[in-house]
Amino acid sequence: MLVCLSLFERGLSKMTTNKNKYNHLCKEQRNNIEHLISIGKDFTSIGKSINVDRTTISKEIKRNRYIKSYHFEAFDSKGIESAVNNCDRLKKPPYVCNNCPLKQYCNKHKLYYNATIAQKHSDEVLHESRIGFDITPEEIDEIERTIIPLIKDKKQSVNQVYANHSDLLCFSKTTFYNYVDNGVLSLKNYNLPKKSIYKPRKKLKDRNYKRNIMALKNRKYEDYLEFKEKHPNANTNEMDTVEGKKDGKVFLTLIIVETSFMLIRLLDKKTSNNVEIEIDKLKEKLGSKLFSKIFKIILTDNGSEFLNPTYLERDMETGRKLINIFYCHPYSSFEKAHVERNHEYIRRIFPKGYSLNNINEEQTARLQAIINNIPRDKFNGKTPYELTKEKYPELITKLNCKYIEPDEVTITRKAVLGDK
């Protein structure tokens, strides 16, 4: 009975704490929050747009804002408190500097809200809060003495022991099964006959499926064609990934259609977060103006790694839209034929199924340089590097793209890997 009371008191404590919790938000909602505070929307408007209360927005920003400083870690509470104390603007909504008109002239520590960083921070906090098991050794001993023999020796079902010993089992049956699965209790699944005969349920459709469909709104291939017709001078690019072994490193490829110049970036895994990081690096190195000029249109496929267009398209500090992302029809790789054809050069060096896990960034840069210095018949023997240097010399300089003498271009794995 004492065990039950301790669990009951803990439950009451949790219920009290829950009153102060805010709703868990998804990445798309956080993207919207970031965009809307960057264009000066108030918390009421933001809350209505993502169907949550304005107080949820306030708590979300205060909880997941970070300090941009060489003196403090991103979520250092003392650093954030210091920044707030030194700036009256940070004491009022939106509590961050995203939309502050004075930020470029301000020498104080700045606080920002970034959807990707907020999502990662929230996940880490949630994970840490769930580490360990919410049960004491004394409670386990009492259950082992009283409940476990009924199931093991007398073959009683979990439902039966719950019906007769609710004073000891003051947690849900799901929690009970979790304790069994994680070895907290001395039972095994074969001691639970009803559970052992259950077939595992088929996975439901990805909960992000509907959100992914929304990402394609006004960004389908037909919208791309319409946009091209209205903006004939807008520069077109195609984006894709090249896989090695399953669940390993991949290449992110981005080709400037006009010159067939291909940027290749190495990703640890094929995830939207890794793609966003590489696109952020491009924005930073090229600057918003040049990035927007060169990559005005990007056509890609429906891979989950590309289904965060709001983030990819915008300057997340200003909220300004820089580029336009569009998506091919499913299973229609021919709609982005330029990048697909260029992948043939990669596959000559790294055939399908070849693991990229031992490839590094320096070798990736060599691969990019080799491919971009191969002459193309359609350009009358000129190389993508030469054409891009003529058209976009700043890109070549800012990204430190390498020129290779014609007779030194070696299209072999040995040349890429740098083997002697």
Image: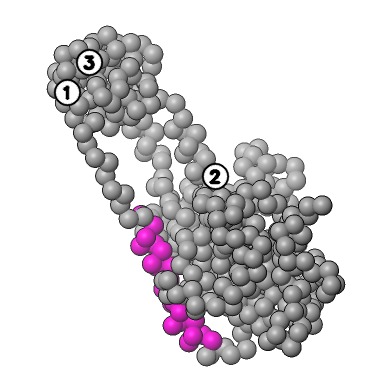
**The disc label shown at residue 403, or none:** none
Residue 65 to residue 18: above or below: below
Q: Residue at x 27, y 41 (%)?
A: 200
Q: Residue at x 26, y 24 (%)?
A: 190
Residue 417 to residue 18: above or below: below
Q: Secondary structure at mark 3?
A: helix
Give the distance between the C-alpha atoms of the residues marked 3 and 2, in whole angstroms: 43 Å
Q: Secondary structure at mark 1?
A: loop
Q: Secondary structure at mark 2?
A: helix
**Is 393 on the left or on the right of 145, as rendered?**
right
| Residue 301 location (% of width, % of height) | 49, 69
Nearer to us of marks 1 and 3 is: 3
**Is 206 on the left or on the right of 247, as rendered?**
left
Q: Give the total number of marks visible in the rendering.
A: 3
**The disc label shown at residue 121, or none:** 2
Name the kind of residue labelled 2 in the image: His
| Residue 159 location (% of width, % of height) | 16, 26
Residue 119 to residue 295: above or below: above
| Residue 254 location (% of width, % of height) | 62, 70
Q: Nearer the viewer, residue 391 or 106?
A: 391
Tell me which numbered mark, 2 or 1, is placed earlier along the sequence: 2
**The disc label shown at residue 152, or none:** 3
Q: Residues within 10 Å of mark 2 (few under 14, many from 20)?
A: some
| Residue 26 location (% of width, % of height) | 43, 53
Nearer to us of marks 2 and 1 is: 1
Name the kind of residue labelled 3 in the image: Lys
| Residue contact between numbered discs 2 and 1, judged by CB atoms under 8 Å | no
Q: On the image, numbered disc 1 is attached to which residue?
A: 157
Q: Nearer the viewer, residue 400 or 193?
A: 193
